[in-house]
Structure formats: structure tokens, C-alpha cells
Image (cartoon, rainbow, N blue to C red):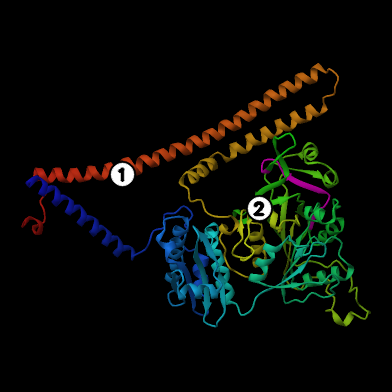
Amino acid sequence: MKRWGKLLSAGVLLLLLLVISNLLVTWVFGGSQLDATGKRRYTLTAETRRIVSTLRQPVVMQLYVSEEMLSEWGELGAHATQTAVFLSRYRLAAADKVRLEIRRIKAFSDMEKQAISEGMQPFSENDKELYLGLKIVAADGRSALLPKLKPERRALLENDLNRILYGLNESKKVKIGIFSPRIPFAAIEGKSVFSSFAALLHEYYEVLKIPRESSLIPQDIGVVLVIDAGYLSPVFAYALDQYVMRGGKVIFLVDPYSEIRHDMQGYPPKPDIEMSHYLKTWGIDYLADRVVGDMLRGEKLKGGDGRYRVYPLWFLTEGENKTRLRFHTAGSVRAVDGQDLNFVELAATGRQGGDIAAEKIRYASKAQIILNYNQDYKKRVLALLAEGKFRSHYRGGILDNTESADKVQPYLPFAVRDAAVAVVADSDFAANDLWVASADPANPVYGVVPYVGNAAFLLRLIDRLSGREIGLSAAFSTSFDTDNIAETLYLDSAKMRQEKKEKLSAREADSAARLRQLKNSLSDSEDIERRREIERAEVQYRLDKNALQNLERQTVAAADDKMELLIWLCFVVFPSAMLGMFFVVAFYFRRGRLRLPAVLRRK
């Protein structure tokens, strides 16, 4: 009995030590909380804290959440809890400017009626309607609504809130001009091409459509977005030129081969050489007659024979801030030498780049394109930004001495203030098919789940050119964070072997291309030497393919080893260490080498 009393006393002592150490840490660090997630999911970025601290008026965040959702342990319940915790960070960042209200909803209650009247949209789970939505109300009465906080967009919540809070801080929205003469920016016969991107623009900016024959672009337009313009009419080309001379900002989406326009008109489009000439005066050389690709990052497509092959003209790459981008039959741009401008590379292919003449893909199948593709292992720039003082395309005002002369501003031969011209060599870049994983027609802005960051890339660029310092994180570019520990370990393991994988992938792609060329060049006649060469090429291809597969197995094995080590630490080593400490303390008490405090020894 005495022995068990000592063990109990040792346990009480350990508990006291734990409480004292916890109080000590709290006293030293002031109650700071630790975010141990890999991507700092519960920690606000410095830019977010800056936006919150500079709010000009108080805001109230009203989180509508069903009580049944909070009581469940499923994905929605965990997502609701995480969302509430994350929103509390905003309140802690500026308690005098942000108030958080959590409005619990019971079925058929007045709170549910209020949520519906506010525009909240339900999740349908097990024949139940559960709500998780957010309304942000500013002191001046302006508000923003996120009617359905989807789990797939949880990594985008901070960016959504940043844009909303920044907008509530602005006295008026930035004006954006859209010039898209050949691809309508709205719906086409019931099929929407740019609907998701257009919804984002209308949510965050004041969007104006610029007519085809405009002779003047107002300077209060912050950024002009020109989509697949092709040939510019003389009047509009002059208006755009003078807009830039007065410090305007323009983003061009150009394309040597627009797949959207191909679907619309029913036949392959021709390259637009006119736009190449127009941009060259402003220091950007647009190669309108070549379509670029990336064999290493190309998408795998299923051919008629059932085999999957890499199609290099459809590929993924990374832009600024590690944003994943998707391009289809894109062109390339480069800076013109001798220009007194500042150039910034916004996106490019990898080092395994290549290209093909635009004319060769107009009536060719994808299999033929793969055979004719030129793999030269050179990087191509896909998006380029030029900033500085540009020079005019014209030597005089083209509307001088005409009836329209009094409707335009005086001619300027050189820019009077710094301007900016950005070129993205893919006019299909903002189309839904290239970046939207799923979309909710009832929630066109916050119901879109992106799988790459095309739209986010353009929004960042617009913010940058218009001077809006929102400070978005790279999470906006991807769908959602990696929650799975195994997947995180695998990605870390793959990152360590990335360079070796690129070399093996390039070698395997070369072997496959050489083998296809040899087989296609083989005639019906018995060419013994050619067949032996094909056999050698097949052996080399199998060796390269096996090397790539072995590297993948090594990557998986390394991730599995880390997972096994983590399991041992969590479920064996750490519990054993804690148990060992307990028995060591108990042993010393039993030997009398440690004495209990007087309070515990009275008994």
C-alpha cells in the first residue's frame, strides 16, 4: 500500500511539473500560440496583418454555421472548426477594428430564416441542409458575402478576405477596361468561355467594355486588358498608344494559335503578325509564327491506339510566386535589345522547352504535331512585363485637322510618365477550361475551385499595375493545401530528387521521340541496318524508362521510410520515453533519494 502511495505521489509531482512549466511558458511568451502546420494555415501573413491594421472603419465578420456541422467529425465539421479558428486570428490582429460573430443555426429556426434571407447557400448532406457562410459588414453599410465556404477553397480564404477588406477600405473601385473584339467576354450561345474570370473581375473592380472604334481611352481607367485583338483599327491603335504615353497600363493576351477561336469559327486561325509589329515598338518581341511547348511538363493524352503520350503544346509551368500555370498552344516573347525599359519575366517554360511552326499545327493531328515538334532544350518566355517611358508609334496625331480632333487629347511623341505593358502569349489563358476544376453557377465567384492559378496570376498582375498593394499569398494559385501527412512526405522526397528526375525525364523523352522517328521512317522494304538501329533504340528507351521508374520507386520508398519513422516516434518512442520517466521518478522515490514536498508528506 505504501508503494502505491509513492507511485501516486510521483504522478502528482509530474502533473505539478507539467502545470508549472505550462504557466512558465505562458508567462514568458505572453500566451502566444504555435502554428505547427506545414503551410502556416492558421497564421496570418504580414500583408494580412498590415491590411487589417490599416482598416479605416470597423468591420463585423458574421459566420453562419449549422450546429449539426460543428457536432460532426466529418470533413465539413473539421472545416467549420478550422474556419472559425482562422477567423479568430483576424479579431486578435486588430480587436478594435474586427469583430467576429458566430451565428449558430438550428434547423427550422429564425436564425436559419435569417441565413437564407442573407443569401447563404446550404450544403446537402444526408438529406440535411447545413450552412457555412460568411458575411462581412463595414461600418458605412457596405458588405460582402461568401455564401458557401467550400472545403475545396479553404486555402483561398485568406486571399478572399484580403481582397474584400482591401475593397472595403477603398473609396471606389479601380476601373478596368476590356477590349476583346474577336472573343466575346460574355457568353457565346449559352456557353461561357471567360465567365469565371469575368465574375472575379466584376467582384473586385469596376469593369468597362471598350468599343472597337474608340478614339480615346480615358486615363481614369487603371488597366486595359486586350484579349486576342489581332489587327487593331488605326483609330483604336492610336488611342491605345496615347493612353500608354500618358502613363497607362496595358495587358495583352496574344496567341499564335487560339484554340477558342478555332472552336468558334470552325477552322484553324492564322498567326497574327500585325500584333507582333505593334508590340515591337514598345520593346517586346512577340514571336507570332511559333508555338512553344515543354516536353517534360506536357500533359499526357490518350491516343487512338490506347496509349498515353506527352503532348508538349499543352503544359504546366510556374510563374511568379511559384504560381502553377497552364498554357495551351502558347507563343513566346522576349525583350528587344537597346530599350531603356525595365523588363520582368513573369512566366516561362522549363529548360526542356521546344517549339513548332504555327502553320504546321493548323491541320495536323496531335500525333503528327508530336513528330514535328522541335525539342531544342531552350527556355521560352511566356509572359513579360515592360515598365518605363515608352515612345509612340506615331510621328504626329493621326486625328489632327479632322472633325474628331477636339475629342482627343493632344498628341505625345514620348511617355510623360512611367507606363507598363505586359504580354501573355496565350489568349486562351483566362478561359474556364484552362484553370477551373469546378464552378457553382449560383456562387460564381466564391464557388469556383481552381486547380491552377491562371486567373490568380492575371489578378495579381492587374493589382500590381493598378497600384493595389493587397499582398496575396501563393495559395490563391492552387486549389487547396496538402492535409495528408503521407502526401506531404512524398512531395518533400520528390523535391530532393527533382533535378535528377528532370534529367532522366528528358533522356526518356528523347529516346521515345527517336524511336518514333525511326519507326515512321521504316519502309516496307527489308532494311536490315535500319531494323537493327530500331532495336538498339528500343533497348535504350527501355533502359531510360526503367531508370525513371526506379527513381520513382526510390522516391516512394524514402517517403515510406519517413512515415515509418514518424509512426515509431509518435506511437512507440515518445510514449516509451514518457513511461520511462515516470518509472525513473518512481524508482528514486522508492529508494528515498527524492523527498516529496511537505504538503504531500503530511498524509
Q: Position of residue 408 (x, y in %)?
A: 84, 79
Say left or right for 100 vs 142: left
For label 2, the residue is: 325
Local secondary structure at mark 2: strand
Indicate whether residue 153 is drawn in magenta: no
Count the marks: 2
Residue beneath the point at 61% across and 66% down? 443
Quadrant for residue 200, please give it. Answer: bottom right
Q: Main secondary structure of the magenta part?
A: strand
Which is more toward the observer, 290 or 367? Answer: 367
Q: Is residue 325 above or below residue 166?
A: above
Q: Position of residue 82 (x, y in %)?
A: 45, 61
Indicate whether residue 285 is drawn in magenta: yes
Q: Is residue 53 visible?
A: no
Could you tell me the amino acid type at mark 2?
Answer: Leu
For label 1, the residue is: 574
Evaluate if marks 2 and 1 touch, with contact meaning CB atoms under 8 Å apart.
no
Q: Quadrant of the C terminus?
A: bottom left
Which is more toward the observer, 298 or 199? Answer: 199
Badge 1 local density, few (<14 within 10 Å), some, or many (20+)? few
Residue beneath the point at 46% across and 46% down? 485
Could you tell me the amino acid type at mark 1?
Answer: Phe
